[in-house]
Image (spheres, rainbow, N blue to C red):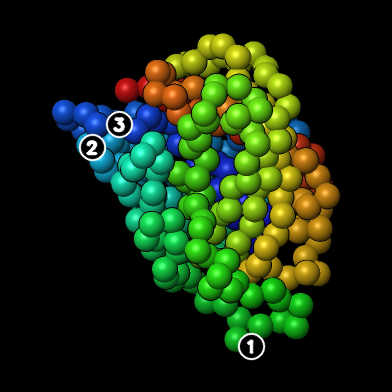
Amino acid sequence: MLCRRLAAALLVLLAAAPGARAAPESLETNYTISLIGLPVGRASFRTTLDGPRYRVEGTLASAGLADLVSKTQGTSSVSGRVRAGRLLADRYRLAYTSDAKSWRSDVRYRGGRAVSADVAPPPRNPPQPDFVPVRRAQLASVVDPLSGLMIKPAKPDPASLCSRTLPFYDGWSRLDLALSPSGTRAFSTEGFEGQAIVCDVRVRAVSGYRTSSNGIKYLSSRTLQIWFAPVRDSGIFAPVYVRIPTEVGPLSLTATTFAKP
């Protein structure tokens, strides 16, 4: 489950530049999802900026060969405020179905701290013996899976952008994405053409998981990759390409439309 939620988190990749505006502005970003080069899904997101407020609403659906095996559909949203160049979430929500099962998460934040989480199905009580519970102290400084992938580096180079750790919390689990610089790559899509900054990513499970999970063991031993591109002239960078190793083969997410009005 944690592996699926990580993939879902990496799908909701914002593509908008915060800043004060006289009227609300909406931007659209679309992604294709492929497994070992075969199309298996698509995702679409609309970001609305209204002065100091922002909101992102997205949809995710399986497609192609994936529908023959397991049909997946989901929605996700986040709302919050822009403060000092940062996106600070107030509320994050995720709901999706897969293999005829459903999951839902509703997390509220205040000043970078997660203050409440309502999830379904609820955590098992009592938990499994090897379950690592989420502790209150681990939620003092966290980011949501949507706006957490928006980064405004001090300088537009790999060292500045990728030298950081993102402390994700989705209502179920706490995990860190440890980024490190890996150069640049040429990337072209509708809305962007140029050099993308490449970050290698290692997943570190913190809490809200079972130590016996084969998925966690596999992801923790592999290197993911995220390519970031500048969102127009904002100074903000957002993902345009993601590569996630799986036991079947690489799962990739590629922007087909990037921050288009």
Mark 3 and mark 2: span between their CA atoms? 9 Å
Q: Is residue 145 left or right of residue 179?
A: left
- Which residue is found at the position 48% from the left and 52% from the top? 144
Q: Quadrant of the C terminus?
A: top left
Question: How much space separates mark 1 and mark 2, taking CA atoms?
Answer: 44 Å
Front in this rendered view, residue 113 or 10:
113
Mark positioned earlier in the residue sequence (3 or 2): 3
Which mark is nearer the camera, 3 or 2? 3
The residue wearing badge 2 is 50
Q: Quadrant of residue 147?
A: top left
Residue at the (21%, 33%) spot, across then down: 24
In whole angstroms, how far apart are the C-alphas of marks 1 and 3? Answer: 46 Å
The amino acid type of the residue labelled 3 equals: Gly
Sequence order check, earlier mark of 1 and 3: 3
Q: Secondary structure at mark 3?
A: loop
* Picture mark count: 3
Location of residue 212 with respect to 29 vertically, above or below: below
At 67% from the left edge and 19% from the top edge, which residue is drawn? Answer: 184
Residue tagged by mark 3?
19
Identify residue type, mark 1: Pro
Vertical placement of 191 versus 259: above or below? above
Comparing labels 1 and 3, the label whose residue is closer to the camera? 3
> Callout 2: 10 Å neighbours few (<14), some, many (20+)?
some
Q: Residues within 10 Å of mark 3 (few under 14, many from 20)?
A: some
Using the image, determine if residue 95 lies above or below residue 66: below
- Residue 148 point in image, percent of width and height: 50, 45
Looking at this view, name the residue that lies furthest to the left. Answer: 22
